[in-house]
Image (cartoon, grey):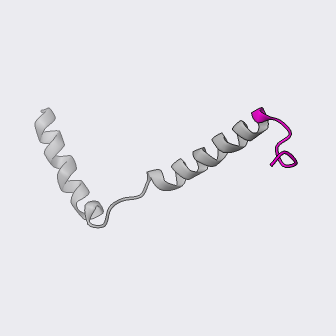
Amino acid sequence: AKEQFPNEESLKRYLVTQFHHYIEKHSMRCHRGFEKAKPELLKMFEAIET
């Protein structure tokens, strides 16, 4: 690992970048069926707020 990352700071930057990509990739995922129920749920929350 020392050859690929000359110091701890470069390793940290690499890991942060990898975590960021992972979070971006998986943050928009939806459970099966939730996408169909989402509009109805949004209407219910709007009704609660008003």
Q: Nearer the viewer, residue 23 or 34?
A: 23
Where in the figure is residue 9, as x and y percent of width and height? 76, 32
Q: Residue at x 14, y 46 (%)?
A: 44
Residue range highlighted in magenta: 1-9
| Residue at position x 82%, y 43% in the image | 5
Q: Which residue ends up furthest to the bottom in the rendered image? A: 32
In this picture, residue 22 sits left or right of residue 3: left
In the picture, which quadrant includes the C terminus?
A: top left
Judge whether residue 46 is colored magenta. Answer: no
Q: Above or below — where is 5 with respect to 25?
A: above
Residue 5 sits inside the magenta stretch: yes
Numbered marks: total: 0
Tell me if residue 35 comes above or below residue 24 in the rendering: below
Picture coordinates of residue 7, whole percent (x, y): 82, 35
Q: Nearer the viewer, residue 8 or 16?
A: 8
Rendered location of residue 31, percent (x, y): 32, 61
Image check: 29 left or right of 50?
right
The residue under the point 30% across, 61% down is 35
Image quarter for residue 14? top right
**Residue that appears at 52% across and 48% down:** 23
List x then y, in percent, for residue 4: 84, 49
Q: Is residue 47 left or right of residue 11?
A: left
Establish if 24 lies above or below 46: below
Q: Residue furthest front?
A: 2
In terms of depth relative to the viewer, which is nearer, 14 or 45? 14
Q: Main secondary structure of the magenta part?
A: loop
Asked where in the image residue 6 lies, by quadrant, the reply is: top right
